[in-house]
Image: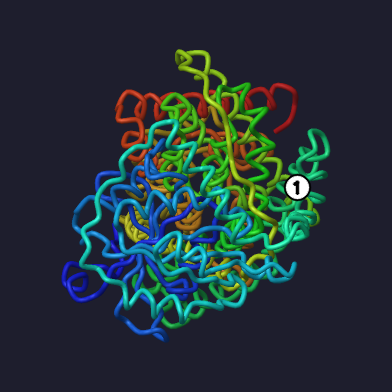
Amino acid sequence: MSYGKLSKTKSTTKKIIALVGAPNSGKTTLYNWLTDSKFSTVNYPGATVEYSLGGLAPRFGDDLELIDTPGTYSLHPKSADEEVTIKALFEKSFLSQPQGVVVVVDGTQLGRHLFLAEQMRETGFPMVLVVTMSDLLEKQGLEIDLELLSEKMNCKVISFDGVLGAGLTQLITELRSLDVSKQPHLHQVWDAKTSEQKSEACEKLAHQALFKTEQDRQKLNNIFQKTNKIDRTLLHPILGLLFFFLIMATLFSGIYWVASPIMDGVDYVLGWLGEKVMELGPNTLWADFLSHGLIASFSAVLVFVPQIFILFLGIGILESSGYLARAATLIDRPFSKLGLSGRSFVPVLSGFACAVPALMATRNIPSRRDRWITNFMIPLMSCSARLPVYALLLGFLFQEEPVWKAGLALAGLYFASLFMGSVAAGVLNRLIPKDKGSFFMMELPLYRRPRWTVVLTQSISRTKSFVVKAGPIIFILAVVLWAGTTFPNYQAVDDQEKVESSYAGQVGRIFEPLFEPMGVDWRVGIGLISAFAAREVFVSSMAVVFQVTSEDEASQQKSLLEKMSTAENSRGEKIFTVSSVLGLIIFFMIALQCISTVGMAFRESNSWAFALGQLVSFNLIAYGLAVAVVQGLRAIGVS
């Protein structure tokens, strides 16, 4: 775990400022401007909820450290992520307690968001109030009375433009001049009467600060007209779901066909590199290791990195544009049939990127029962680690077909994984006793044009994190598999003879009876076993086990597909057929092969019975269904 730039040494010399605000208030946009999007995302000590740490952007200086806390509507938490915000503000941990606070409020939702600011004011925290969405207000001729807000809230108030960054310099100046000698205290809970009075006072203050004439209220309504007009379609009970599936299908199928030209380029370069290495040391162990071991292993996975980047980019665009919150609202009704709410949608969608942060994201679900069900279905979502496997197997099935067909098939796999997750959630919904009724509420942000620099930066960062995480595992297994498939008969001229007589071949044949019902032999079995270290390793394992070279074509992927097309078992039967490949796809769709996910499932549920039960049940079901599909297709004549 990385703890970013904050350290005990630096925290004694730099002023630490926490950003606090409601979800979709523009808080993270402000944070990205302050840090130039250069920060570390970490877990709060003792919890799995993420928040961000970063230093001030170099162009502004280096005397401030910033904490972007999880969004919260109140200082009295109702979910785990809101609880982390309170702990980050008031509990001393390995970090020094924040010395000041920036409370971020949405100018278009001023009355509701001032409620949190009023709570923060009563704690005695040195604070600056930042009003976002000011550019939208100015377009309608609205101007917030900042002096009135400053007087009533007893703090400096700054208007911030999230598109152009106007107001940053003034904010940084005010943060530097904050009097941090005050000692804040926890906020005392208001009773129902006081809470109602405070809410009315905030609405009244917002009215005074925004509306100077009767026409001003209509001007504010004009800001929402475009969003409301779009929502009449995208939130329509029928059309909304239709557009939802079209948007998701475009994203998932686009992962394949948009990335295809880039993948070909990466594949060509890596294939050329492997060929040149072999030319430098023909018939030598070191060249064989570098070319057939390391380069073949890494290229088998790296060639699919463009697809992974497009997946992260697509999710980032949906989130920053404001559509993701709408999707959660749309999914609330079908999710309710599974005992869930729309609040589970964002973690489930995050599972298409990676199950580990998706499991963390369930901490914002107040109901413990809903969290368990959501945690149970998340590992079934087709994460980015499965993407290289799907792409390889679909590439085999659609070798002579147009790229768009494989893209549609990939989209189908994503929707199939969502269906399987829904089935799993439905089963668990019947097994876990229902708790008291809960309701789903989410504040829908205005539709905004994404800040492309931020979306691109975050997508690159997440893709880089995937590669860095997978790299060591691929390297270790590449060394083990190369050595296992090369020795002891490394001097054999025939590659197939060398592999069959190798240590890996001897071990693989012991487990071969387990994999034969799936229509594959011990070589694919080695790949399946290796995939329990990381799913994407299956592809690199295939490249090593099948001795992939690129002597005829400077393309590692094409060479691997050709090897798969001609590979035969000991009985002279084709290993990779329509039935066996479909069986492998089903196995990877359901099997839980990620140790990190198992560990995170335990942390989130605090139950080894839950985590291990999930591990065993998913793998047994995956194996059983894969065997049933292969044998069933063969029974009706589909080889």
| 106 sits left or right of 578 in the view | left
320 to 265, vertically: above or below: above
12 to 25, vertically: above or below: below
Residue 82 appears in which quarter of the rendering?
top left
User: Residue 71: x, y in percent?
Assistant: 46, 50
Q: Is residue 188 visible?
A: yes
Secondary structure type for disc 1: helix
Q: Nearer the viewer, residue 576 or 50?
A: 50
Q: How is the image coloured?
A: rainbow
Q: Nearer the viewer, residue 317 or 206?
A: 206
Q: How many marks?
A: 1
Q: Nearer the viewer, residue 102 or 84?
A: 102
| 182 sits left or right of 220 in the view | left
Q: Is residue 471 visible?
A: no
What residue does disc 1 label? 408
Residue 481 appears in which quarter of the rendering?
bottom left
